[in-house]
Amino acid sequence: MSTVKPEDRMKNPFWQRKMKHQFSCLDANKNGILSSDDFEILANRWIECGKLNQEQGKKVRTYVLGFWPAISNGKEAVKEDEFLIGLSSVLGDEQKVRAIFDAYFDAIDTDNDGVISSKEFGVLLQSYGIDPTVAPEAFDGLDKNKDGIISRSEFIEAGTDYCQGIDEKSKSRYFFGLRF
């Protein structure tokens, strides 16, 4: 994947649709702004949907709540347009993006077996309020080698491409379950 300049990414309608969908997923209370409350709701929903034990729940909560400071940049609330502008500039650092998805992988892999199962992926989508019927197709789109699991490298590559890419045909478009 080639690196896209932030200003080119911001102008791309496909990238904007993906990131607006991402904003909608993160806006757990559906009030049109992101705040720390949304991340509390998301963490609780993920723990509940996955029926996670205390240790698993702590790992998920740490990841989800740790993401808010990176998004908020010290603000109490973030509007959609601010989210898009902030993301566009942060996403220019591929090493940082890959590190975020490496940590995200660990949060999703709640059974600590080193892979993401279709069940774990389905719980993730459900916790974001995404229609569970899209989970199998989305999972299949991310499972590049078709072995029935998503490896760390498949996940990081797909997540990085989802956030940085502007290719409408890329399988990474399934990352958050939405079919574009």
Image: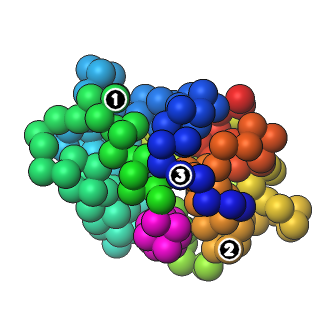
Q: What stretch of residues is rendered in magenta?
A: 93-104
Report the Cα–Cα distance between label 3 and label 2: 24 Å
Is residue 94 rendered magenta in the image? yes
Residue under numbered circle 3: 5
Q: Decide which of 121, 22 is in the foreground and name it.
A: 22
Q: Mark 3 vs mark 1: which is more N-terminal?
A: 3
Residue drawn at x 36%, y 40% is: 85
What's the residue type where badge 2 is placed?
Ser
What's the residue type where badge 3 is placed?
Lys
| Horizontal side, residue 178 vs residue 106: left or right | right
Residue under numbered circle 2: 153
> In the current view of this chain or complex, which residue is farthest to the right?
146
Location of the C terminus by quadrant is top right
Is residue 151 rendered magenta in the image? no
Q: Which mark is residue 93?
A: none
Task: Please provide percent x and percent y for residue 82.
Answer: 29, 35
What's the residue type where badge 1 is placed?
Asp
| Horizontal side, residue 162 vs residue 25: left or right | right
Task: Please provide percent x and percent y for residue 86.
Answer: 33, 45
Residue under numbered circle 1: 81
Total marks in image = 3
Task: Please provide percent x and percent y for residue 175.
Answer: 63, 47
Categorize mark 2 by other alpha carbons within 10 Å: few (<14), some (14-19), many (20+): some
